[in-house]
Amino acid sequence: RKNIVIAIDGFSSCGKSTVAKALAKKLHFVFIDSGAMYRAVTLYFQRNNIDLADNDAVLEALENIHIDFIPNPEKVQIHLNDEDVSEAIRTMEVSNYVSEVSAVKAVRTAMVKQQQSLGKKRNIVMDGRDIGTTVFPQADLKIFMTASPQVRAERRYAELTAKGEVLTMEEVKENLSHRDHIDSTREESPLRQAEDAIVLDNSELNQEEQLDFVVNLIKEKI
Ligand code: C5P
């Protein structure tokens, strides 16, 4: 039997990666955070002052970027050219620019290719924006996650302040709506719900309930 692919898409800070991670752990699948890849590219572009309008510079930069996921007992690390950037990609500086970078066609082409090859022979859970629509249109199960804007902002705020980042709730809300807007209006594989995706609104569900919801779907569908 072929390998199994579970795609989890949705807006920023809906808790996609929390569910995806828990699910991968339970099923012994590989978890792949596609957003982390776009964040790593963004970090590289920022560090090297790559002009998004300069197509040659973008293509050259993409050739010089190597992203790896390194499984650790504790958590999966993301490496950018052999440097562990797991923390560095989570700053507001990266968050405020990642959607601009992700809208560039050459960036998407390069990332989609890598994502497809990561999911080729293994059972995976991948979360992102276009996994069910573009990366794996044949995924065995597609989930589209949503949550109310207030719930999303509160979760995101708690997550960032716990890490010591100093910012206001307003800034968090602004970043989320900024990214949602760019992500869903860009020309190149915009964020949208795949026709055959199942919606999971987790505004009022705890983590266990969300996991149960997905596990039940898997039992039904796969
Ligand atoms: O998932 P996360 O919020 O970390 O993703 C960061 C950004 O990367 C998103 O706001 C979006 O601009 C971009 N992204 C994307 N396609 C994906 C995953 C993420 O464009 N599959």
Image (cartoon, rainbow, N blue to C red):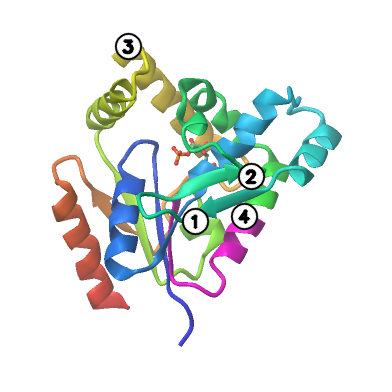
Classify mark 2: helix, strand or loop: loop
Amino acid carrying label 3: it is Thr
Q: Is mark 3 within 8 Å of ligand 1?
A: no
Q: Which residue is disc 4 drawn over? A: 112
Task: Residue at 68%, 37% (x, y): give it.
Answer: 104
Mark 1, ligand 1, within 8 Å: the answer is yes
For image coordinates 24% across by 34% down, the residue present is 148
Q: Secondary structure at mark 1?
A: helix
The spot of residue 204 in percent (x, y) is 13, 42
- Return the residue at label 1: 131
Residue ID for mark 2: 82
**Location of residue 188 by image quarter:** top right
Q: Are marks 4 and 3 in contact (CB under 8 Å)?
A: no
Q: Left or right of 205: which side holds 145?
A: right
- Horizontal side of residue 139 vs 101, given as left or right: left
Q: Earlier in the sequence, mark 2 or mark 1?
A: 2
